[in-house]
Amino acid sequence: MLAGSGTADLAYRITQVALPLVVLQETGSVAATGLVGGAAGVPVLLSPWWARKARQWVDSGPRLAVVAAFSAMALATVPATAALGVLQPALLVMSGLLLGFGDALSNPGRSALLADTGDRWGPDKAVVLLTWQDGLRRIGMLIGPPIGAFAIAAGFTDTLLWIEAAAVLVAGLLACTVKAERAPQEVVAPSIRASLQGRPDVLYGWIARGTGCLTWFAFTLGLSVIGAQRGQPGVYLAAGMSGYGVGALAGTAVTLAVIRRIPPVPLAAVAWFVMGLCWIGMGVWTTPAAVTVLAALSGVTVVLGIAAISMLITRSSEGAERRALLSGQSVVVSASSSAGLLVGGPIIAAVGAEPTLIGAGALTSVVALGILLKKPHQPSQIPGQVRNLDHHAA
C-alpha cells in the first residue's frame, strides 16, 4: 500500500507541473487552469451525505483497486480529449467531478487500512505508518517537479498526464493483497459530525489545515503562472515544490519526537502560521532561490502539523469511527483545496500572482494565529478509548 501510494503521488507531482500548461495551451484561459482540481472538490465536499456507507465499503485492497481503476479513467479523460483537439472547460469539469468521486473514497480508505495495520503492530504504530505515507508524499514533492520540468522541456507534456493515470491504476493493483478490516454487520456507519463529538481538538486542527489547503492554489497555480509569464514555464513551481519536499523530509525525520512533546493543537496552528508567512515572502521576493528557501521552511512546519492531527485521530478512535474521521479530514483537505483552485484562477487573472500569494499568506496566518491564541486544548479523550490512550502514553 505504501509503494502504491508513493507511486501514484510521485506521478501526481510530476503531472502537477504539466496540467496547468496543457490547459493553458489548449484553452488559452488562465482562469481554466484550476478547473479539474476545483471540480474534484465538489463530490468530496458532498461526501458526508452520499459516501457515509460507501466509504465503509472501501475496507480492503481489492475494493481500493476498483476505486483506483475508476480514478484512472477520470484522469485519462484530459490527455485523451487534448489529443483529439476537443479539450473544453466542460470536459475539464467532468474529469474533475469523476476524479472527486474516486478521491472521496480512496484517500480515507487507504489511510484507514494503513492505520488498522499499524494498530496490529502496537501502540502509536498507526501514526507511524501514516507518517511514512506522508514521508513518501514528500519524496514525490522533492523529485516529481524537476522530473516534470525536464519532461516538459523535452516535449512530453501530454505524455505526463497518461503516466499519472497509469500510476493510479498500478497503485490500486499493488494494494490487492491487503485484507479487509470489516466492522461487524450490526455496527451502524457513523457520520462525520457524530464522530467529531467530544473531539474539539480535531476540529481546531481541521480549521488550521483547511485554511492552508484553501490558499494552496496561490503556491501551485501562482508559481505556474509566474513561470509562464516570465518565459520559464515550470521552473518556479519546480523550485517551490522541490524546496517544499526537502523541508518536509527534514520535518518527517523529527516528526515523532516533536509531536510527543508539543500539544497537537498549538503545533498545528504554528505550522500553518509559518506557512502563511512563507507565502507572503514568496509574493515579495519572487525569485527561484527565494521561493526554494521559503518553500522548504514551510515544508518543515506543515508536516509536523499534519502529523499532530493524525495523532489526535488515531489515538482517540478506531474502526468505523476512525474511518469516518479520516473521511472527514479528506473532505476538509480536498474540498478546501478544490475551492481554492476554483477561485484561484480568476483571482490570479484579476490581481496577479504575486499579490495573490501575499493575500493568501496573510489569510492563512491570521486564521492560524486565532487558533493559537485560544486557550490550549488537550487531546480529546473519548469514552471507551481512555484505556487505549493510557496504553499509548506509556
Image: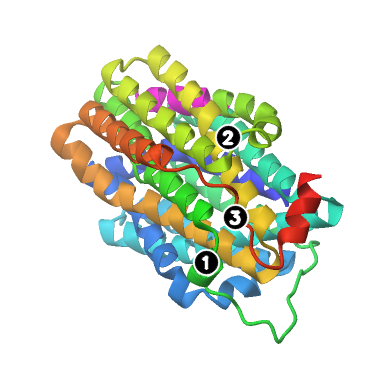
Residue assigned mark 2? 304
Q: Residue at x 41, y 49 (%)?
A: 207
Identified by mark 2, the residue type is: Leu
Quadrant showing the C terminus: top right
Q: Nearer the viewer, mark 2 or mark 1?
A: 1
Q: CA distance from mark 2 to mark 1?
A: 24 Å
Q: Residues within 10 Å of mark 1 (few under 14, many from 20)?
A: few
Mark 2 vs mark 1: which is more N-terminal?
1
Q: Nearer the viewer, residue 102 or 206?
A: 206
Q: Which residue is mark 1?
A: 197
Q: Residue at x 26, y 28 (%)?
A: 358
Residue type beneath disc 3:
Ser
**Where is residue 208 drawn, in percent x and y?**
43, 44
- Vertical arrangement, residue 256 with respect to residue 242, above or below: below
Q: Earlier along the polypeptide chain: callout 1 or callout 3? A: 1
Q: Secondary structure at mark 2?
A: helix
The residue beneath circle 3 is: 380
Q: CA distance from mark 3 to mark 2?
A: 19 Å
Residue stretch in magenta: 232-245
**Which-is-in-front pick, marks 3 and 2?**
3
Q: Is residue 234 magenta?
A: yes
Which residue is at a point 29% across and 21% down the rendered structure image?
Answer: 231
Q: Nearer the viewer, residue 99 or 205?
A: 205
Color scheme of the displayed model? rainbow
**Residue 256 falls left or right of residue 274:** right
